[in-house]
Amino acid sequence: MDLHKTQRVVRPGPEAGTVWVDGSLYSSALPETHRALEAPTAGMTAAEKARRREAFDAREPYRFVPHAKRDATRGTQRFRGPAVDGHPFKVRCPNTPASMRMPHTLPTTTCVPGDPCGCGKTLTIHDSELERDRQHHPWQSTRWALSFNRRTLVEGLIGANRYQRLSVNRGFFRQAGLVATAMLMAVTLIGHNLVSLHAWHTRRGRPEPWQVHLGEPIDDRPLDKATRTRGRGRRRSD
């Protein structure tokens, strides 16, 4: 989900040395330059959006990640910091000596030895804590964008099938029950996909793969023109 501008702020974390940034929990070692970032806008090119998302991806080494499965009974989940010993280190933190022996290709934090930092902490976070902002992938990261863009594709497909291609509206299925409706919807989409594939090959003068596979003659009939069925106007009562 996207975040409103009022949600895109930096908040103190549940313990010293942690911060909430754009709905995700990070160690306070997260550089200041990585905290307030400008999100891509709709008018940008794909290359410009990718460059901006690289800055959001740079936050990943400092992020707390799930340490265990969610406890449904308690409504909590364990998260571990980027330098918890016994796991792959994502940063080199002076407060975790073992991490300092890792290659310099990992980011080195500016944490002061002895001062509280969240790099080596494991925390228990309640589901209700900042529940409106939290989500599976960090906001505006590349993985988040790939997941979020599915929503546009799905909504476009639903809208096209409901109003332009199939008119799947109230009364299209005359069968009650979720299972029956889902089965009929699956059959409807299969038929729609077959018609779309046939139209795609026919427009380009190519033989349809199923016709070739089954050894059927080429169907060179002209394509029918699809039209929308307009709703009936309500009659005025006397």
Image: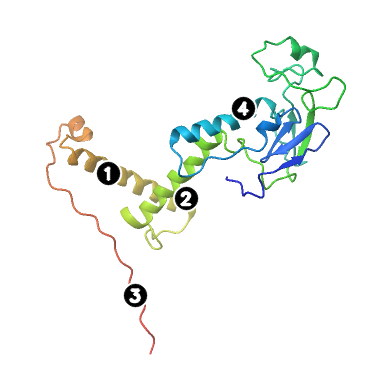
* Residue 74 image point, x, y percent: 78, 41
Q: Which residue was labeled with disc 1?
A: 196
Q: Are marks 4 and 3 in contact (CB under 8 Å)?
A: no
Q: Count residues near mark 1 (Cα–Cα under 10 Å), then give few for <14, some for 14-19, many for 20+.
A: few
**Outermost residue toward the right in this view:** 114
Foreground disc of the pair 2, 4? 4
Query: In the image, what residue type sits under mark 3?
Result: Gly
In this figure, which residue is indicated by the disc labeled 4? 58
Residue in the picture at 33% in, 43% down:
190
The span from disc 2 to disc 1 (Cα, nearest Å) is: 26 Å
Marked residue nearer the N-terminal end (2 or 1): 2
Between tags 1 and 4, which lies in front? 4
Picture coordinates of residue 117, whole percent (x, y): 81, 27
Residue type, mark 1 in image: Ser
- 104 above or below 180? above
How far is disc 1 from disc 4 in space, using C-alphas? 42 Å
Q: CA distance from mark 2 to mark 4?
A: 45 Å
Where residue 81 sits, quadrant-wise, is top right
Mark 1 secondary-structure assignment: helix
The residue shown at (66%, 24%) is: 61
In front: mark 2 or mark 1?
A: 1
Mark 2 lies on a secondary structure that is helix
Q: CA distance from mark 3 to mark 1?
A: 31 Å
